[in-house]
Amino acid sequence: MDNHNETEGRLKTTGAASLAELHATKEYILPDEHMKHPVAVIECIEAIPCNPCETACPVHAITVGSEITNLPVIDIETCTGCGLCVAACPGLAIYLKQKEYAKGLSFIAFPFEYVPLPEAGQVIDMVDRHGRVVCKGTVIKVATIKKFNRTAIIHATYPVEQYEQVVNMQRLARD
Amino acid sequence: MQRILEHPILGPLPEEEKVTIYVDGEPVEARKGEMIAATLMATGKPYFRKTVKRHEPRSIFCGIGRCTDCVMTVNGIPNVRTCVTAVEDGMVIETQMGFGDWGGNDSK
Amino acid sequence: MMERDIVVIGSGPAGLCAAIEAAEAGAKVLLVDENAKPGGQLFKQIHKFFGSREHSAGVRGIDIGTLLLKKAEDLNIEVWLNTEACGIFDQDKVWVVRDKSKSMTIHAKRIILATGANENVVNFPGWTLPGVMGAGAAQTMINIHRVLPGKKILMIGSGNVGVIVSYQLLQAGAEVKAVVEAAPQLGGYGVHTAKVRRAGVPFYTGHTVLEARGTDHVESAVIVQLDASWKPIAGTEFELDVDTICIAAGLTPAVELAFGAGCRSVNSPVLGGLVPWHDQRMCTSIPSIYIAGDVSGVEEASTAMEEGRMAGLSAADSLGYLEESRYKARFEAINHNLLALRSGMFGQKRRDAKEAIMAASKG
């Protein structure tokens, strides 16, 4: 009856893309253990007119092109992991990831527009694309610079077993 | 408490002068300049008026002054759209029953 | 009688851009709005806009609003707030009532209607209960008035308005219990639904609300699954504990002034119903009346701004304020921006619908 419990969801029915849908999109590039620093991962799989990610990148690692409905293509070799695209994306569809950040730990820097914000060192619940808590994570840093225009970027580590599953954190309770 | 004190994009709720309005006889604290409907929603009033024939409760629907679902009697005048009318100190607001009292002999 | 070159009715994104463009061309513009504050729906859009740099992509709607207001101020555009436009007569006279007390008629060589659109309703038993409201009403409450309409929300409709307002309700501190969509697929952008889904909100496609329950206020809602013929399937009902039901079922252009003035209509189901016929210059079937924004067909704030610029430019040009080369250059630039916004899997449909309106016979 209700479809929100499917383990493999689908974008136009559950609201979140399934891993199958992402893997079928050639522009979805998940860096493997060869990347020695975090780089941008773009989960933008619908052709809508939009290119702030391309404009924001200071090293031109993202290409959309003159047809602004093109899906953005990330060149992870050029990407420096600065995170400007993460904040610039109006759809909050970009995050930074590194598979082997430390022993047994992956890294993610994700956009977050809620209050309260966590603090560095805090242990948080990491969620998958369906908002299900799949593991704990530890906050390294919360970046709220003016250039991010009120989008906070939270840097966190989490178990490498959940490398692809984790995309964000569970919202913290408001007092 | 239904007021949004902290907001990730809009920031903290700015300080504002307080005024007192009277809702069905009871004094209610409001923020100066806010819409009557906002004050009433913030203070948890469940409905604003009751309909003429079946006495059914009504409150806001469109919120921007187009549908007239939110009307109440304000300072004795019925059918005031509370979602686009600002509070004033001492304002008297009453739950409107049906058409409200227009002061004539044939009000029903 | 007061005279103006151009009277713009409505100070939302379309009206503001129309007034600015016309004033930049040198026309004497009067901008009127029935509300106490300008900006229309723009100041409720706290999210970042899409598009490209020319479309103010990446800028929050609220900040675009502030920039436009500043521009209007810098150009010394005359703005009358708390001014209701009650009718248009003889194709060039605008009757307004100021502050609910002062009635005036303005002779306007050109009129630009930018009156926007109104939220649709969905009728179901209990829909009149306090707590059932338009999604836009909830957005107004949280982003303008900083008040939560409720704590436990049911959103009906998964188009961009429904999913964006759902996200904003989460940001405001409410719990969105579910988003219900009657169609088999969600309507809004995938990036919008993804944000809401990863906050743990369930989406129910092929479902609708059967009933809202409560005495003085919404206390719960009953959801039911629909079959392929859009009929409720008995036995699939379930109840949700909610205190607010938001209806995001589309918008209908606010066309009263246009049709009252005699503008011919065209039916555009994709863009919200009956709209005034208009051409690429945003001129209606009446040469002195132009339109822009949702009143000409429901799209987005980005397209409203471009259409406003087109209407303002064309109205000013028709009064002789622009050199032909300058008009052509701006016309091309604005059209280029509009085409870019009306492309892709979501935009193409709107582009086809706009072209169909313009291609239809005038009446």
Image: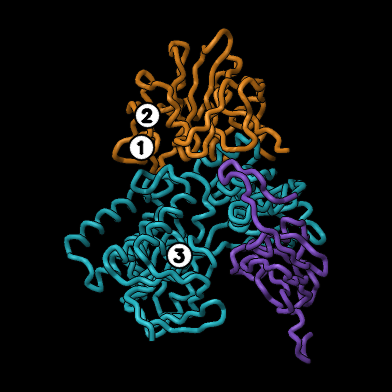
Chain colours: A orange, B purple, C cyan
Say how many tags the image has. 3
Q: Position of residue C27 (x, y in %)?
A: 29, 70
Would you name the residue on which mark 2 appears? Answer: A73
Q: Depth check: C62 or A38 in front?
A: C62
Would you name the residue on which mark 1 appears? Answer: A70
In this image, C308 relative to A138: left or right? Answer: left
Would you name the residue on which mark 3 appears? Answer: C11
Query: Three-letter amino acid code at disc 3?
Result: Ser
Residues at marks 1 and 2, CA–CA distance in whole angstroms: 9 Å
Residues at marks 2 and 3, CA–CA distance in whole angstroms: 39 Å
Q: Are marks 1 and 2 in contact (CB under 8 Å)?
A: yes
Query: Three-letter amino acid code at disc 1?
Result: Asn
Q: Nearer the viewer, mark 3 or mark 1?
A: 3
Q: Is residue C235 above or below residue B67?
A: above
Disc number placed over residue B85 in the picture, else none: none
Chain at numbered mark 2? A
Residues at marks 3 and 1, CA–CA distance in whole angstroms: 33 Å
Q: Depth check: C103 or C135 in front?
A: C103
The image quadrant of residue C59 is top left
Say which residue appears at 61% left-offset and 55% top-offset.
C135
Under circle 1, the secondary element is loop
Say which residue appears at 47% left-offset and 40% top-offset.
A90
Query: Three-letter amino acid code at disc 2?
Result: Val
Q: Are marks 3 and 1 in contact (CB under 8 Å)?
A: no
Chain at numbered mark 1? A
